[in-house]
């Protein structure tokens, strides 16, 4: 580690020990969780990343939640039903629930929340109203609300997981810049403090409708380097560390007594986006060649300690089409496809040219965001250079990457990951041309039409056929370099008992804390 990184790690560790009160008993010290990236907002209508949704799910609640096993379960709505037209969904709200500022949970709050999502002046980023084709929200009575959709939408409850319900008086009267750091909800915790680039501190909501959380306080801190996060864990400045590598997990499991490893097959699909609007990438033969050029088996063996297999398409099991197979590593076939597309090494320097211009480009990689992201990207770049496409890896801070994604100025290739709602429609939806985070510019008429049909199909067999056909189409069209379905590793102190979720989110009430043993 360089002197600069060592100094930064020690500085962060000193701050951590001061903040968490290392040395205090387990009963008094807050649970401290180290994450790899910083949240940019805690306004749910502008949130776009897993860390933001993780914080918010501990503060705010939706009508329908995603349980630890990824099933949709009642949250602020006790139950719901859809009428015969399949366009009117009625939700029955829990009674006696209050927001932490004292406002009641009622139909008005639900209507306000959905209307705020669609407020054109706010220019929100949340896509729920569009995904459920929301027409209007009807207040039936204080605890009954109806969502009217323009067309039948089969999975309305699935889309509502990130639609956290807001207290109307607070959000209507508070400046936008203030609510982004001071969210209010009905959830198990309240945000007590957010020091940008420092920490977020949450305190238990003693009036939570499910009962007071057992863990009184939680501190979340962004520490980009995995090694620095683990150093703080060993020094006692943290209780749970996210996003560690598989080799680090193996090392801790073998050698570090008093620490725990938690792991789960996650739902994040990690891929390299191909901007099909860039020069030769509009040719499907070139995109297929990129996939055949990548030796993912070697990448998995070298960097992932054998964990994970290559994705075939974009849908996760058990909804994946079993007949759709991953691209095989075949550099000879990759070169043949590139030649077929008219690319030649005119200068004999090993770099292919198109229309007299060499194929030299950048691959944008968000540093510290995805497991082994830099290492995997460098290996992919080397594989692509071996077939004549000169790729230079360009690391970007997560905030810069998000800004460039928002401005749609990412490089022709970019490493990215989409989490999953564990439903075939939501998995396929990451390639909707209208999705702001999809920069591939891939706009296939058959995909657009079939996806539209899938959204309105209620029958299980009809949905399965549409999904399977779409998965095969995506595999053949190759708008991504398909990599892997990420396996997630976490490290924890001896006082943590926890089972990680497949969606990477950490719901604090699911964590059990043991009393720290006194030093002997």
Image (cartoon, rainbow, N blue to C red):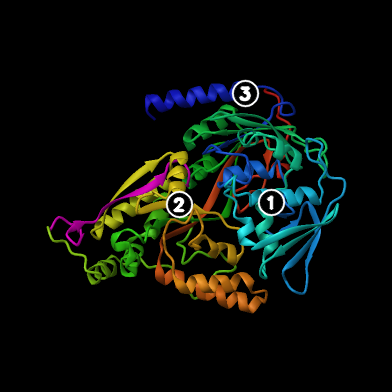
Residue 222 position, x and y percent, is 54, 34
Q: CA distance from mark 2 to mark 1?
A: 31 Å
Instruction: Give the side of residue 31 with respect to residue 366, left or right.
Output: right
Identify residue for label 2: 416
Q: Nearest the camera: 142 or 70?
A: 142
| Quadrant (top left, top right, bottom left, bottom right) of the C terminus | top right
Q: Is residue 380 visible?
A: yes
Q: Is residue 31 left or right of residue 465?
A: right
Q: Secondary structure at mark 3?
A: helix
Considering depth in this image, is 318 or 144 the residue closer to the camera?
144
Kind of element beneath mark 1:
helix
* Within-10-Å neighbours for mark 3: few <14, some 14–19, many 20+: some
| Residue 438 versus residue 177 in the image, above or below | below
Q: Write down the residue under mark 3.
A: 19
Verify CB contact (< 8 Å) between mark 2 and mark 3.
no
Question: Label 2: few (<14), some or many (≥20) within 10 Å?
Answer: many
Q: Taking 178 as reference, is 73 left or right?
A: right
In this rendering, which labeled residue sits more in front, label 2 or label 1? 1
Q: Which residue is mark 1?
A: 115
Q: Earlier in the sequence, mark 2 or mark 3?
A: 3
Residue at point 64%, 41% (across, down): 55
Q: Range of the magenta residues? A: 348-372
Q: CA distance from mark 1 to mark 3?
A: 39 Å
Q: Quadrant of residue 135?
A: bottom right
Disc 2 to disc 3, C-alpha distance? 33 Å
Say which label, 2 or 1, has the lower sequence index. Answer: 1
Residue 383 magenta-highlighted? no
Q: Quadrant of the N terminus?
A: top left
Q: Position of residue 62 (x, y in %)?
A: 72, 51
Q: Which mark is residue 101?
A: none
């Amino acid at each position: 580690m360089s002197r600069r990184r060592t100094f930064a790690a020690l500085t962060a560790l000193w701050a951590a020990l001061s903040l968490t009160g290392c040395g205090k008993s387990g009963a008094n010290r807050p649970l401290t969780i180290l994450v790899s990236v910083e949240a940019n907002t805690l306004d749910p209508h502008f949130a776009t990343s897993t860390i933001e949704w993780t914080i918010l799910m501990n503060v705010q609640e939706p009508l329908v939640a995603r349980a630890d096993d990824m099933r949709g379960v009642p949250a602020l709505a006790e139950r719901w039903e859809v009428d015969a037209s399949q366009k009117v969904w009625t939700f029955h709200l829990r009674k006696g629930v209050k927001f932490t500022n004292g406002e009641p949970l009622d139909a008005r709050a639900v209507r306000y929340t959905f209307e705020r999502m669609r407020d054109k002046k706010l220019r929100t980023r949340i896509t729920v109203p569009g995904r459920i084709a929301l027409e209007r929200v009807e207040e039936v009575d204080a605890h009954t609300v109806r969502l009217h959709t323009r067309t039948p939408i089969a999975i309305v409850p699935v889309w509502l997981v990130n639609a956290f319900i807001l207290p109307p008086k607070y959000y209507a009267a508070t400046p936008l810049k203030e609510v982004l750091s001071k969210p209010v909800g009905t959830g198990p915790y309240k945000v007590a403090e957010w020091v940008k680039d420092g920490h977020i501190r949450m305190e238990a909501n003693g009036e939570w409708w499910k009962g007071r959380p057992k863990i009184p306080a939680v501190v979340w801190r962004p520490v980009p380097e995995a090694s620095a996060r683990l150093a703080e864990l060993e020094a006692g400045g943290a209780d749970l560390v996210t996003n560690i590598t598989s080799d680090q997990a193996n090392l801790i499991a073998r050698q570090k007594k008093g620490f725990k490893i938690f792991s789960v097959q996650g739902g994040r699909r990690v891929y390299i986006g191909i901007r099909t609007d860039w020069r030769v990438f509009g040719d499907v033969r070139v995109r297929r060649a990129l996939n055949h050029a990548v030796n993912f088996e070697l990448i998995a063996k070298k960097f992932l300690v054998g964990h994970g297999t290559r994705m075939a398409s974009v849908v996760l099991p058990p909804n994946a089409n079993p007949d759709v197979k991953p691209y095989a590593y075949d550099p000879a076939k990759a070169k043949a496809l590139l030649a077929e597309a008219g690319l030649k090494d005119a200068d004999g320097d090993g770099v292919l040219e198109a229309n007299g211009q060499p194929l030299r480009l950048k691959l944008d990689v968000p540093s510290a965001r995805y497991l082994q992201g830099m290492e995997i990207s460098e290996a992919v770049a080397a594989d692509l250079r071996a077939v004549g496409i000169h790729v230079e890896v360009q690391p970007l801070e997560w905030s810069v990457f998000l800004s460039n994604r928002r401005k749609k100025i990412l490089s022709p290739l970019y490493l990215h990951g989409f989490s999953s709602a564990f439903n075939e429609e939501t998995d396929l939806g990451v390639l909707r041309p209208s999705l702001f985070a999809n920069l591939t510019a891939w706009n296939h008429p058959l995909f657009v039409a079939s996806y539209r049909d899938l959204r309105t199909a209620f029958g299980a067999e009809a949905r399965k056929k549409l999904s399977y056909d779409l998965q095969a189409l995506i595999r053949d069209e190759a708008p991504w370099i398909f990599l892997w379905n990420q396996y997630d590793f976490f490290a924890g102190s001896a006082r943590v008992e926890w089972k990680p979720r497949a969606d990477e989110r950490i719901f604090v009430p699911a964590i059990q804390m043991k009393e720290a043993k006194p030093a002997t």
